[in-house]
Structure formats: C-alpha cells, structure tokens
Image (cartoon, rainbow, N blue to C red):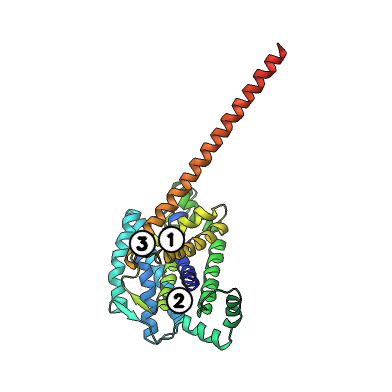
C-alpha cells in the first residue's frame, strides 16, 4: 500500500506541471485549450527522439519545452489572427499535433529502456552519495512495510515542480502577467487600455503548453517510453487536478492557487491508485474513475455551499423569531 501511494505521489508531482499549464489556460486566460492532449505527446516525443539520437537528456527536455511553447503559440495565432473559435483552435491543433508527433517519432512508440535519462542520471548520482539511507531508516522505524527505491526521482521532480510554481507566481505578478490575467477576466476592457491582447493570449498559451510539454517529457523519461497515444485524456486529468485543488485548498491568492493545483494533481493520482486496488475495478476503468472524481469535485462544493446557506437562513430565521419574542415580552411587561 505504501509503495503504491509513494508511486502515485511521485507521478502526481510530475503531472502537476501539466496541471499548472491547464490552470494558466483555463483559469487565468479563460481559454478552453484542448491543445494539451497533443502538446503533452509533443514534449514526450521530442525528448525521446533526441535521447535516442544520443543527445543529453537535459538538452532534450529543454527542446521539448520549446516545442510545447511553439505548439501553444500556434493555437493562439489560429484564434487571434485566424479568428477561429478558441475551442475549435485547440481541437484543430490537437489533431494536427497527432500527425506531427508521428513525424517526430517516426513510429508510434519509442522505448527508452537502457538509455540515459534525467532520472537515471539523478538516481545514479543519488545512489553514489547513498542519500536514500536516512529516508529508508525513517520508513523502517515507522514500521511501514516496503522500502521505496526512487527517492531521487521524487525529490528531483518536487524541486522542478516547485521551481516552476514559484516562477509562475512571480510571472503572474509582473506587468505582463497582470495583463494576461486581466485579458482572461475581461478582454474588451484590457483592449480599451491599448493593450495588445492578441500577443498576450499567444504568449499565455505558449507558456501553458510549455509546462504541459515539460510534464510529457518527464513522464516519458520516468516511464521509459514515449507513445503517440499517451496524451489522450490529459486535459481531463489536468482539469480534475485544478478542480480538486481549488475545492480543497481554496483560491484566495495566486501562490495558494498554484499550490492547490499541485496538491490536486497529487491527490488525484493517489485516489486513482487506491481506486484501482479495488477488486471489481480494472486498469481499463481509469477514464471512468477520472470522470467520477471530476463529478464529485464539481458537485461536492455546491452541496456544501447549499447546506451552509440553508444553515445560515435557519440561523437568521431563529434570530428574527427570538427578537420578535423578546419584543413581545417587553410589550407585555410594559402593559
């Protein structure tokens, strides 16, 4: 059980990068960007083919980020310059990326087993320094069965995700970041202040898909393969992470919201991991599980809000009745 949760936490941290990208497009820009399903694979394909050709995994990952950024920018151009509906722009780019990804990979699947990836490099350095020993001793002392062997991957992924989170927090507070946020809130208003909303949308979508591609590149290196179909349903997973995080942790500040998105991605992976351990559920039910999680995340806050509102009304009614009763008693005492 612990090893399963540990693995889910580990993968959730990597998928959190994709969730941050979805948050930028759906929440900040208010742009329903379906490019995510394609740009996720673009990141994985770019990193995988470069690693297969002997490039450094770190250079390959950076190239994947650039590829994702370009994909997002093209979606923005289709919408702003081509005057295509936002939803349709994303769908068109997602479809186009399927063929582009096949062109990049040259085949439908690229195995990375035996190749040097960022995770094998980090793990090798971690093991040479014997940094896992203190953590394993803590796990053993707590009496938890099983000893994780991927502490290096967990901490490296966590550091990268937190760095991206803090960069996002800082960027959204800069002049351009504030302009992008304002564009998402009211595009017509920000345009009336002579802001170039087209450029803001293009840059915002580019950054969003760069995060998604980074997640795809890391997932490919983590799983040991890149597949042309690995991006199917990524947009739903990203939305589930955002919705769960916002429902559980709140959205009072940008820093809190981005942290909530990361937490939502981790919780989503843990819930899916635990759900798949149920006897009557199978791996093929993962999409159904995702749909149920999203529905629960959407419906539960509304139910809780309605209950709080009903309790508030009952409390208000009781206060009014009590005030009326006290007023009646005062009148009776006066007479």
Q: Residues within 10 Å of mark 1 (few under 14, many from 20)?
A: many
The percent position of residue 59, horizontal first and vertical second, equals: 45, 81
Secondary structure state at the residue bearing disc 2: helix
The percent position of residue 6, horizontal first and vertical second, equals: 50, 72
60 or 160: nearer the viewer: 160
Q: CA distance from mark 1 to mark 3?
A: 14 Å
Q: Is residue 77 visible?
A: no
Image vertical order of residue 19 relative to residue 147, above or below: above
The percent position of residue 176, horizontal first and vertical second, equals: 52, 59
Q: CA distance from mark 2 to mark 3?
A: 20 Å
Give the residue number, with chain letter if any, for mark 1.
22
Q: Residues within 10 Å of mark 2 (few under 14, many from 20)?
A: some
Q: Nearer the viewer, mark 2 or mark 3?
A: 2
Q: Nearer the viewer, mark 1 or mark 3?
A: 1
Give the residue number, with chain letter if any, for mark 2.
62
Callout 2 touching callout 1 (CB < 8 Å): no
The percent position of residue 236, horizontal first and vertical second, equals: 38, 59
Secondary structure state at the residue bearing disc 1: helix
Q: Is residue 253 visible?
A: yes
The quarter of the displayed image where residue 323 is located: top right
Q: Residues within 10 Å of mark 3 (few under 14, many from 20)?
A: many
Give the residue number, with chain letter if any, for mark 3.
75
């Amino acid at each position: 059980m612990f090893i399963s949760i540990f693995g889910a936490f580990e993968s959730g941290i990597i998928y959190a990068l994709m969730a941050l990208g979805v948050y930028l497009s759906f929440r900040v820009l208010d742009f329903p960007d379906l490019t995510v399903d394609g740009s996720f694979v673009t990141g994985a394909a770019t990193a995988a083919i470069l690693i297969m050709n002997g490039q450094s995994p770190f250079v390959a990952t950076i190239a994947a980020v650039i590829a994702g950024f370009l994909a997002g920018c093209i979606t923005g151009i289709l919408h702003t310059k081509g005057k295509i509906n936002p939803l349709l722009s994303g769908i068109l780019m997602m479809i186009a990326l399927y063929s582009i990804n096949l062109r990049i990979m040259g085949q439908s699947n690229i195995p990375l087993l035996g190749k040097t990836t960022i995770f094998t490099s980090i793990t090798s350095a971690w093991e040479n320094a014997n940094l896992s020993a203190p953590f394993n001793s803590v796990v053993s002392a707590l009496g938890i069965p099983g000893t994780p062997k991927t502490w290096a991957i967990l901490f490296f992924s966590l550091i990268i995700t937190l760095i991206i989170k803090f960069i996002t927090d800082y960027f959204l507070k800069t002049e351009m970041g504030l302009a992008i946020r304002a564009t998402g809130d009211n595009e017509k208003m920000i345009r009336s202040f002579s802001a170039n909303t087209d450029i803001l949308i293009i840059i915002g979508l580019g950054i969003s898909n760069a995060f998604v591609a980074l997640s795809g590149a890391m997932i490919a290196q983590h799983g040991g393969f890149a597949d042309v179909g690995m991006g199917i349903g990524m947009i739903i997973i990203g939305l589930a992470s955002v919705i769960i995080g916002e429902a559980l942790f709140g959205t009072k500040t940008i820093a809190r919201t981005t942290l909530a998105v990361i937490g939502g991605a981790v919780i989503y992976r843990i819930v899916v991991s635990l759900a798949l351990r149920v006897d009557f559920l199978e791996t093929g039910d993962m999409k159904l599980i995702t749909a149920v999680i999203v529905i629960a995340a959407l419906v539960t806050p509304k139910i809780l809000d309605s209950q709080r509102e009903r309790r508030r009304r009952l409390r208000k009614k009781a206060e009014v009745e009590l005030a009326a009763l006290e007023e009646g008693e005062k009148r009776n005492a006066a007479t």
